[in-house]
Image (cartoon, coloured by chain):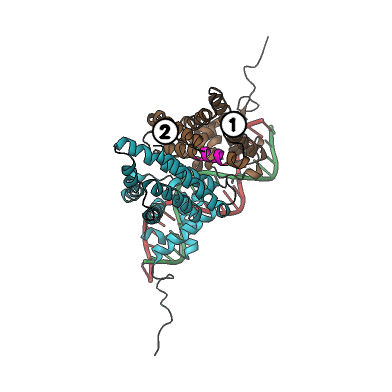
Chain colours: A cyan, B brown, C green, D red
Amino acid sequence: MLMPTSRPTGLHHGDLRNALLGAALELVAERGAQGFTLAETSRRAGVSVAAPYKHFADKDALLAELARTGYERQHDLFQAAMSAESDPADQLAAFAAAYVAFAAENKALFEITFAAGLEKQRYPALAEAGDRVLRLLRGPAAQLTPEIAAQDDLIHTIGAAAHGFAAFLAEGIFGEPTAALAATQRRARDAARKLALAH
Amino acid sequence: MLMPTSRPTGLHHGDLRNALLGAALELVAERGAQGFTLAETSRRAGVSVAAPYKHFADKDALLAELARTGYERQHDLFQAAMSAESDPADQLAAFAAAYVAFAAENKALFEITFAAGLEKQRYPALAEAGDRVLRLLRGPAAQLTPEIAAQDDLIHTIGAAAHGFAAFLAEGIFGEPTAALAATQRRARDAARKLALAH
DNA sequence: GTCTATACACCGATAGAC
DNA sequence: GTCTATCGGTGTATAGAC
């Protein structure tokens, strides 16, 4: 039977929204968060510069959505890593190691979630997703110390230490990131355990 | 005797180079490193957009010079903070606290030194200034452990922890930076001491 | 939902006058 | 050493056709 091989009503496939998110992530991976532009993203997705505005309010909205998925991925990865341990200090150590791995293996998402400079108050879903990640540390912290203030202190300390290792690794201070990943994870794990036990 | 009150040979005073550096720093403080432009910097310094090119090869060269002075300031501040302590673990703790203070009190410089995304190999003086800061930790580390590898490990661990606290503070994760500075310094100091003693 | 076309603004960098 | 003038490029966002 006769069938048009394609309907040129639009030049694009079914899910431009996701295609744009993917192209944007690639772009950030290549040029950094600051090199991200909607125009170049459109080009890479094979559409006009006007098309994205049917899916995102503006440039920042696309970036915020990317950051939100980044936090969700973090949440799932960290939760999985922590659930493999039973001792609370080991759980915090597993979190630190997983945080470092995320930074090395998802450099673009790591950069967006932390350093995209977007106003989280404008994107409640984003703020909530970020809080959810930090809340993962509450359980182990509560097992290690009864007072809320001390728990917050421990959570912040573990988070900061993990972030420091991740940032140094991503920045190349420890050498080529993929090569230095394992050693950096070991260090982060050790540091987190020491900080947890000496609370 | 007759003397012209000023020679309008150029519309600017004696030290445009420094005026440009100051204006650029202000601009970064207001709009972030990614909001820095040479054109706006020129406007703030009261000169044409062409003038800066007599003092800096290009946009990145100005930024690199700013980063270099940032590392120098860090070096002096950290050295002073550490010299006030005699115990090596206390020196490392003092470093961490001073690093946090630098981030809070020189947000623009902190951002430029760490996240400006400039290729340090293109600016040897910049790379050297950065290394000099890290080298400050060598002395105390050597007093705490004899093996070079363990010293490196300790230096990196202390540096990462300090950076994590500083980054979280600057990012507003602990609340308003100036308000949270003292508490964050306390935490960073504690964490550094624990990590140093449990090496 | 996507395109074409466009308005508008800004930037980096250079040429040539003084 | 600074200015004026300018080129070439890129970006955000919108209007209106289909």
In the image, residue B4 sits, relative to residue B57, either above or below, namely above
Point 40% across, 88% down: residue: A2
What residue span does the magenta drawing correspond to?
B153-160
- Kindly identify which residue carries mark 1: B143
Residue A64 x, y percent position in the rendering: 39, 51
Three-letter amino acid code of the residue under disc 2? Arg
Disc 1: which chain? B
In the image, residue A79 sits, relative to residue B94, either above or below, namely below
Residue B76 x, y percent position in the rendering: 58, 27
Tag 1 and tag 2, C-beta contact below 8 Å = no
The quadrant in which residue B22 appears is top right
Residue A111 x, y percent position in the rendering: 47, 49
User: Same subunit under labels 1 and 2?
Assistant: yes
Residue with the most extreme top position: B1
Q: Main secondary structure of the magenta part?
A: helix
- Kindly identify which residue carries mark 2: B187
Asked if residue B49 can be seen in this view, the reply is no
Point 40% across, 50% down: residue: A60
Between residue A68 and residue B130, name the one nearer to us: B130
Tag 1's secondary structure? Answer: helix
The quadrant in which residue B73 appears is top right
Counting other residues with Cα less than 10 Å from the Cα at mark 2, is it few (<14), some (14-19), or many (20 or more)? many
Three-letter amino acid code of the residue under disc 1? Gln
Disc 2: which chain? B
Between residue B5 and residue A97, name the one nearer to us: A97
Left or right: residue A169 versus residue B172 is right
Total numbered circles: 2
